[in-house]
Image (spheres, grey):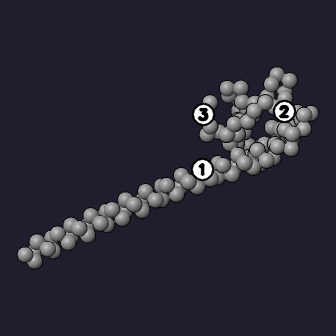
Amino acid sequence: MNKFIITFLTIALILSNLWWVYNTIDASVTTTYQNVSLEDNHEALSQALAILPLVAKQNSTSKQIIEAATNVAITKYSFEKDGYIWIGKIGLKFDKNGRFINARPAWDPF
């Protein structure tokens, strides 16, 4: 009987430790993804607030708006895709005359 109880408790201890390890790893991964998401949102908000005064003025050029977004972006690299100029975590869309039309966060699907 004692051998059965010791074996049962040993197995229970091993299983509970495995459960704790799994939950610790899961919480760590979740926290990492949450932090990345918060950083992305912070960068996009900073960029949006930087271009807001320029967008409010009707005579701002696309170059001025792009420069303002680039100045606060963590990654200064930009590229054009689907009619948007992507800088950091936002995409900026301009018409043929260089007038601002729209902005999108990088994680927002079309």
Instruction: Please report the residue visible at 60 percent of the width from the left and 33 percent of the height from the top.
Output: 109
> Which of pointers 3 and 1 lies earlier in the amino acid sequence?
1
Left or right: residue 41 compared with residue 72: left
> Which of pointers 2 and 3 lies earlier in the amino acid sequence?
2
How would you rate the neighbour count of disc 1 (Cα within 10 Å): few for under 14, some for 14-19, many for 20 or more? few
Q: In this view, does 21 lie above or below 44?
A: below
Instruction: Report if the CB atoms under discs 1 and 2 are less than 8 Å apart.
Output: no
How would you rate the neighbour count of disc 2 (Cα within 10 Å): few for under 14, some for 14-19, many for 20 or more? some
How would you rate the neighbour count of disc 3 (Cα within 10 Å): few for under 14, some for 14-19, many for 20 or more? few
Give the label on residue 62, or none: 2
Q: In this view, does 49 lie above or below 2?
A: above
What kind of residue is marked 1?
A: Ser
Q: In this view, does 32 lie above or below 50?
A: below
Q: From mark 1 to mark 2, how far is it between C-alphas?
A: 28 Å
Numbered label tally: 3
What kind of residue is marked 3?
A: Pro
What kind of residue is marked 2?
A: Ser
> Which of pointers 1 and 2 lies earlier in the amino acid sequence?
1
Q: Could you tell me which quadrant the N terminus lies in? A: bottom left
Q: Could you tell me which quadrant the C terminus lies in? A: top right
Q: Mark 1 = which residue? A: 37
Instruction: Please report the residue visible at 42 percent of the width from the left and 62 percent of the height from the top.
Output: 24
Instruction: Please report the residue visible at 64 percent of the width from the left and 52 percent of the height from the top.
Output: 39
Left or right: residue 34 compared with residue 2: right
Give the label on residue 109, or none: 3
Give the image location of residue 25, x and y in percent: 42, 59
Give the image location of residue 97, x and y in percent: 86, 23
Give the label on residue 5, or none: none
Q: Which residue lies furthest to the top in this view?
A: 96
Q: From mark 2 to mark 3, how far is it between C-alphas?
A: 23 Å
Q: Is residue 100 visible?
A: yes
Q: From mark 3 to mark 1, how far is it between C-alphas?
A: 16 Å
